Amino acid sequence: MKFAWLLCLLVSTAATAQTTSTYFSDKYLSKRVSENKAKFVEHTTENEDGSITIEVVYLKTNRVVSKTTHKDDMPVGVWQYDDGETTSVRNYDFEIVYSELDKDCAEAMKAAGLGDPTKDNPSINYVSAKPANGEETIFPFLLGKMEYPVAAKEQGIQGVVYLNYTVTQAGKVENVFVIRGVHPILDKEASRIVQLLEYDSGATLNGQPFQVCFTIPIRYQLN
């Protein structure tokens, strides 16, 4: 019985020792202050898998301003943000896929006489897949979702990530993978935003649904 109580105590102590709290005067966490003067608190938790979760809380309302998780500088899990008016999430709960071009898809497009899959081609009765929200191209959407990872900035990492993805006959984005990367931190961020792409409709060829694949560059450049 004494052994069981001691074991319970050790487990409880280990669990509570995972989290540390630091108090700050502003949401940018630029100035540490004592608890009684703080507006925000940052909870840092070391998880069992080696990842570290940082949660920032606005003390007046106990609102979680942000919650992010990293493992060896890589973003993991689902990140949360709340500015008091809107909430948003970023999903990093996936593994980066590295691969070569989708040769089957590329050959099917070549056999159909299709050059640029982003443009309609009346000569072969091809209608391109249409990005959501009436956009002519996907790039305004990608730019709006783009974030430069802090860890990449701190390490001076920049370059162009080349990705391939498929738009199915139903207009769904699938098979997102990196064909030429820069660094895992940027490769994962680029993969994340491409996974968010949506299309109002898939492509058609001779009036029939037609699957297409795209290769796009996403540039990260430090000023």
Image (cartoon, rainbow, N blue to C red):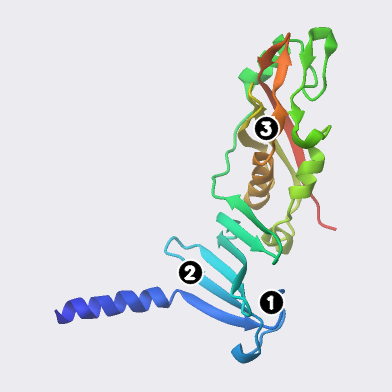
The alpha-carbon separation of the residues under discs 2 and 1 comes to: 19 Å
Mark 3 residue crowding within 10 angstroms, few (<14) / some (14–19) / many (20+): many
Q: Nearer the viewer, residue 147 or 151?
A: 147
Whichever of labels 3 and 2 marks the residue nearer the N terminus, that label is 2
Identify residue for label 1. 29
Q: Position of residue 90 (x, y in %)?
A: 63, 53
Where residue 145 sits in the image (x, y, percent)?
Answer: 74, 49
Cβ atoms at labels 2 and 1 below 8 Å apart: no
Q: Nearer the viewer, residue 169 or 60?
A: 60
| Comes first in the chain, label 2 or label 1 | 1
The residue that disc 2 covers is: 46
Q: Quadrant of residue 136?
A: top right
Does 13 appear above or below 202? Answer: below
Q: Is residue 208 above or below residue 133?
A: above
* Residue depicted at x 71% and y 31%: 199
Q: Are marks 3 and 2 in contact (CB under 8 Å)?
A: no
Name the residue furthest left: 1
User: Would residue 17 be found to the left or right of residue 59 on screen?
Assistant: left
Callout 3 amino acid: Asn
N-terminal of the pair, mark 1 or mark 3, is: 1
Per the model, the C-alpha gap separating discs 3 and 2 is: 35 Å
The answer to which quarter of the image holds residue 48 is bottom left
Q: Position of residue 111 (x, y in %)?
A: 70, 9
The residue beneath circle 3 is: 164
